[in-house]
Image (cartoon, grey):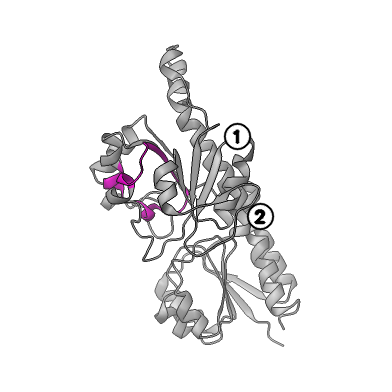
Amino acid sequence: MTPQKVLFIDTAHPVLTEELTRMGYQCDYFENYSRNDYLRIIGQYFGIIIRGKIKLDAEMLTAARQLKFIGRVGAGMENIDVAYAESMDIACLNAPEGNRDAVGEHAVGMLLMLMNRLRIADREVRQGVWLREENRGTEIKGKTVAIIGYGNMGGAFARVLKGFGANVIAYDKYKSNYSDDFVSESDMQTIFDEADIVSLHLPLTPETLFLVDANYLKKFRKNIYLINTARGRNVKTADLVKQMKAGKVLGAALDVLEYEKLSFEALDQQSLPEDFTWLIRSDQVVLSPHIAGWTHESNYKLAKTIVDKVRQLFGEKAN
């Protein structure tokens, strides 16, 4: 019997190919294919593995006549028309369990770097400059940390914060009764009133697109630190820069930027405005290239999570 086939549009940890092959699937990967190439062959495939190279929109999914699952090796699903896929009985699988710990650790690392001026102090010492008073840090202990979105990533961030002695509160529009040993459920007004540090852990949807704009930031009673390890376009960069210049935002830790390409593999060099220049020059900003969930360990765990979910849906044998 001819094995059912899985199309890898993006690369993943080898365990994903190895385990799917062992389960009876034929795994295909075509490194140099474009969208039109995939559109031509997608009708042959039972499953698709993807990160962010192309959009799986209605046109692509309509052509996928045999498709039964999409495995997104990551958390965000914005490059997949999930509603349309599910209307065609295509299972949409993602793997936030695989990189949540990495995101939680990275967010805290960026916050420590920002509040303790570590990037600045490191640079100065390397240049023979020894400034102690100027590089006094600010402690997390005793601060109110607000988590916006309490899913896998928000929960992992709260767990990493446990030992710092912070007051951790969270708001999630679509969840309730989630207070636990790490976080207290809150409403947005309380967050606006009490937060010292705000960390975003949101998907990118029409209602979260540029959620954090000037109006949003001005609602905070205190001057805040902002962390974004979610999606770049959750934050309107121009408004963030204005509020940093005004002193409302004391510092920003940004693993993601509004100007990223769809695949997150590069910045869109055609759309980098003056605000980006300000960010990269500011000592109030810590930046990283969308790597919060991109550890050696999460690379394996993301792939293994997809394997486990495919196995749970379709069993051990594909042919």
The CA span between labels 1 and 2 is 29 Å
Residue 17 in the image: above or below residue 89:
above
Give x and y (percent) for residue 35: 41, 72
Q: Is residue 247 visible?
A: yes
Q: Which callout, 1 or 2, points at the residue further toward the start of the chain?
A: 1
Q: Residues within 10 Å of mark 1 (few under 14, many from 20)?
A: few
Q: Is residue 153 toward the left or the right of residue 306 in the image?
A: left
The amino acid sitting under disc 1 is: Phe
Residue 310 in the image: above or below residue 89:
above
Give 268 or 288, whichever is nearer the viewer: 288
Q: What residue is disc 1 on?
A: 164
Give x and y (percent) for residue 192: 39, 46
Give 106 or 316, whichever is nearer the viewer: 106
- Quarter-of-image position of residue 240: top left
Question: Which residue: 46% across, 17% down?
Answer: 126
Q: Residues within 10 Å of mark 2 (few under 14, many from 20)?
A: some
Q: In the structure shown, which secondary structural element does the residue marked by tag 2 occupy?
A: helix
The amino acid sitting under disc 2 is: Tyr
Q: What residue is disc 2 on?
A: 300
Q: Which residues are magenta?
A: 217-240
Question: Which residue: 50% across, 35% down?
Answer: 143
Question: Which residue: 64% across, 61% down?
Answer: 303
Q: Is residue 253 visible?
A: no
